[in-house]
Image (cartoon, rainbow, N blue to C red):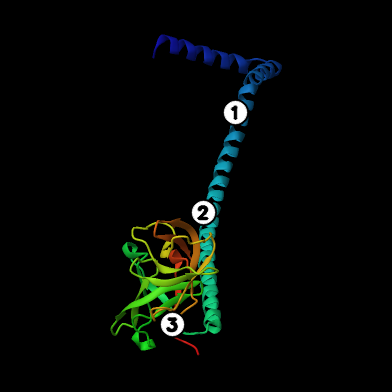
């Protein structure tokens, strides 16, 4: 043992022996001095113990809250999914009610159909519907929505009860059209290369001095034998006059970006 440690041990033993050989009063005084000296350390230790217990209690409480929060988040996610599905069903029911009302009120003999296929590369050109020969549908029949002309049947899929619709927004779909409140008559068709938003239609071969204004409605004339007369096509958006004739851009009445239910016209009621 090192000398210093030995000296410290001897002093401690000597002090202990001295303490216990003293009178009771002296022992109490020594104890009082000792506890007075140790009291701050004891209080500090007790405070630290209390704080430690509170800290661990807080950790346990936070862990419990975190678990409960996870349960609430899962339940909230489930409720959001249910709400989303409910809104989808509500929207679909509204569309079906709208379609049923249109079928009752239109003077055309129509077959309702749902759009089942639409390619991103031909979004504004064609769509496929879930109706074909089994429901009396053939090519070159007009296709409508409750808002106006959609296009015409251009292909029947044999034995699949499906058909392809050439949309009015395709440049190959040309319609004889008239402008309401004016003598102007022209050919309406889609425009090539439109890929964003709801595309505008092009009304050509108007008179050079065509007096048209924004918002005038455009309807079918019935010429050509495919499209019945007085079907809404859209409204005038702008007019560009030329030396020999004028052209107008027409905003379609149908929302071609969000088609769902359409009607194939079999014939016009007498």
- Of the pair 180 and 119, the residue shown nearer to us: 180
Q: Residue at x 39, y 87 (%)?
A: 135
SS for callout 2: helix
Where residue 113 sits, quadrant-wise, is bottom left
In the rendered image, which residue does mark 2 sit on?
Answer: 70
Report the Cα–Cα distance between label 1 and label 3.
Answer: 91 Å
Q: Is residue 52 visible?
A: yes
SS for callout 1: helix
In the rendered view, tell whether residue 136 sits above or below residue 32: below
Q: Is residue 200 visible?
A: no
Which numbered tag is attached to residue 265?
3
147 vs 136, left or right, is right
Q: Position of residue 240 (x, y in %)?
A: 44, 56
SS for callout 3: strand
Figure disc tally: 3
Which numbered tag is attached to residue 45?
1
């Amino acid at each position: 043992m090192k000398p210093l440690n030995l000296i410290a041990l001897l002093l401690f033993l000597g002090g202990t022996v001295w303490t216990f050989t003293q009178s009771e009063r002296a022992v109490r005084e020594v104890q009082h001095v000792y506890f007075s000296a140790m009291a701050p350390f004891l209080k500090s230790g007790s405070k630290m113990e209390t704080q430690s217990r509170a800290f661990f209690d807080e950790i346990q409480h936070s862990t419990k809250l975190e678990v409960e929060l996870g349960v609430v988040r899962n339940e909230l996610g489930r409720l959001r999914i249910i709400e989303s599905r409910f809104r989808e069903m509500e929207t679909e029911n509204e569309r079906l009610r709208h379609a049923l009302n249109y079928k009752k009120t239109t003077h055309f003999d129509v077959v309702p159909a749902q759009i089942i296929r639409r390619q991103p590369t031909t979004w504004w050109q064609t769509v496929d519907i879930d109706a074909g020969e089994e429901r009396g549908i053939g090519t070159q029949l007009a296709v409508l929505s409750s808002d106006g002309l959609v296009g015409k049947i251009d292909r029947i899929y044999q034995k699949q009860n499906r058909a392809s619709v050439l949309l009015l927004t395709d440049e190959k779909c040309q319609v004889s059209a008239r402008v309401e409140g004016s003598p102007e008559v022209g050919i309406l068709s889609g425009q090539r290369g439109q890929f964003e938003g709801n595309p505008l239609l092009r009304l050509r071969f108007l008179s050079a001095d065509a007096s048209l204004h924004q918002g005038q409605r455009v309807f079918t004339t019935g010429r050509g034998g495919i499209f019945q007369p007085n079907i809404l096509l859209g409204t005038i958006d702008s007019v560009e006059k030329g030396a020999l004739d004028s052209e107008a851009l027409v905003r379609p009445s149908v929302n071609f970006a969000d088609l769902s239910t359409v009607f194939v016209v079999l014939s016009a009621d007498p």
